Amino acid sequence: MGLLSRRADASATGASFDVIFIGSGMGSLGAAAVLSRHGLKVLVLERHSVAGGMTHTFQRKGYEWDVGVHCLGKLHDPDEPLRRVFDFVTEGALGWARMDRVYDRLVFADRCHDYVTGAEAFEAELCGTFPSERKAITAYVRLLHGVKRASLRYFIQHVLPRWMTPLTHPVLGWPFRRHSNRTTRDVLSSLTSDPRLLGVLTGQWGNYALPPGHSSFAMHALVAENYLEGACYPVGGAGGILDHIAPVITRAGGQVRVRAEVKEILVKDGRALGVRLTDGEELRARYVISGAGAAQTLGSLLPEPWRPPEVTRGLQRIPQSIGHLGLYLGLKGAPDEVALPATNVWVHAGYDHDANLRAFTRAVSAPLPVVYLSSSSARDPSWAQRHPGRSTLTALCPAPYDWFEKWEGTRWRRRGAEYDDLKARLSERLLCVVLEQFPQLKGRVAYQELSTPLSTAHFAHRPRGSIYGLEHSPERFRQPWLRSRLPIQGLLLVGQDAVSVGVGASLMSGVLAASIVLRRNVLGDLLRKDSP
């Protein structure tokens, strides 16, 4: 039957599990592996035909693309907490390749700006471009480190009992919320009045899908600080994450089931008892851990009588993050032939990111606000051996769900001529950006495919095709209920809504959930020098 199954064995169908996971994203997989290594029996349920959530890869005509793992920070050093966790959940089998010294290149009409590896080098590079802003740049880097430190106490609250929230939320959370309560633009405008510097410092805003006028500065700071020491990519591609975690789960007697969609969380007397699948099958466990996002977990899967009013009101105040377009290109030629960099390239319409996005969401014909270019074939040292003579590149751009909403309910690849025409026009615009940045690719595009927010809703089951779950605005961090421990006993949350955006943050949300189940400090255990 292999590592993945469509349905449990007859003996397992009626069995009890220690923990059932809804969804197989990084938070679920990480927590499942940790619990499996501690002797618990887990069941991971995935509605899609492929497990892995946004860490999975897909193939067309011999080409391969990742859908959500483009690069990760904090993995270069084996002693980094995130690296320790990854090594634990994969039993050290997953390797990491460092990307180029310039991990992000920001392209504007007048010039390019580089983010270089190392906090001091990053600061020096910016000061070389903006010599009169040295004081502001130094203060900015110091703020990034400060938010990171404050976040540690803030996220400790996730593992503490909910009855302590009235005490812990103001005491442990305040140092972090001083930053999360302000927008990125508000904070940076207090440091500099140079609009070009502000645009450069926020050039990664696509990583959390909110421009500086709307994003929480804490969210911006966590992402920016995460990459200060550079970025890495999994050797063997993003699919290697599931390939190395699934055996850890199955060897301990656990399962990863695909095409197993959860319809409802079973609750009795205020405690989660298990789940009911869409085919009617009921499964029981001591804990239910959801990686389906806060809105779906608490607004759809949880029976209505058990939905706390404060949660319902809170969800109404936090929109889903914006959707995106993804142009996936299959290229003729090996990585050394196509000569793509391992660097992430961000092509911006201008330095005012809020104005750029606002114009684009109002009119599809407006300039593309930002296009993110990433090549997994350029950063995976095993690529040439796995896919000889081929390379790939992905171009991503934010796009609102509203543009595609009228095709909601239509079938994938059967949405009609008008939809196909819109996709063709958007594909051509993205391809023009790609060829402008990499003219050596002219004549090498052998395959192309465009995803829209409808694709994300279909394959990842994300409400309104959101790329990062709930938007990471100041309001999102003001919700004391939005944490690992949900208001229903025995029901936990993992994924981007539990902590923050990104694969690394989702994995850490899994560590928090595992700590609650095991009643021990899992991360503390892993950070000990003698830990496996």
Image (cartoon, grey):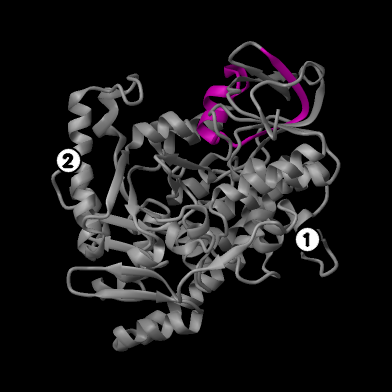
Residue placed most toward the observer, 259 or 404 = 259
- Residue pushed farthest top? 280
In the picture, the disc for residue 189 is: none
Image quarter for residue 235?
Answer: bottom right
- Residue 103 visible in the shown view: yes
Q: Work out how far the residue at label 1 is from the one at label 2, CA to CA, in angstroms.
A: 50 Å
Position of 228 relative to 521 (above/below): below
Which residue position holds label 1? 526
Q: Residues within 10 Å of mark 1 (few under 14, many from 20)?
A: some
Query: As drawn, is 253 to the left or to the right of 228?
Result: right
- Residue pushed farthest front? 389
Count how many numbered circles sit on residues in the image: 2
The residue stretch that appears in magenta: 281-307
Residue appearing at x 77%, y 65% in the figure: 527
Query: As drawn, is 46 to the left or to the right of 447?
Result: right
- Residue 202 visible in the shown view: no
Image quarter for residue 376?
Answer: bottom left
Query: As drawn, is 127 to the left or to the right of 273?
Result: left
Query: What is the x, y in percent for residue 42?
Result: 76, 34
Amino acid under disc 2:
Arg
In the picture, the disc for residue 425 is: 2
Query: What is the x, y in percent for residue 267?
Result: 70, 20
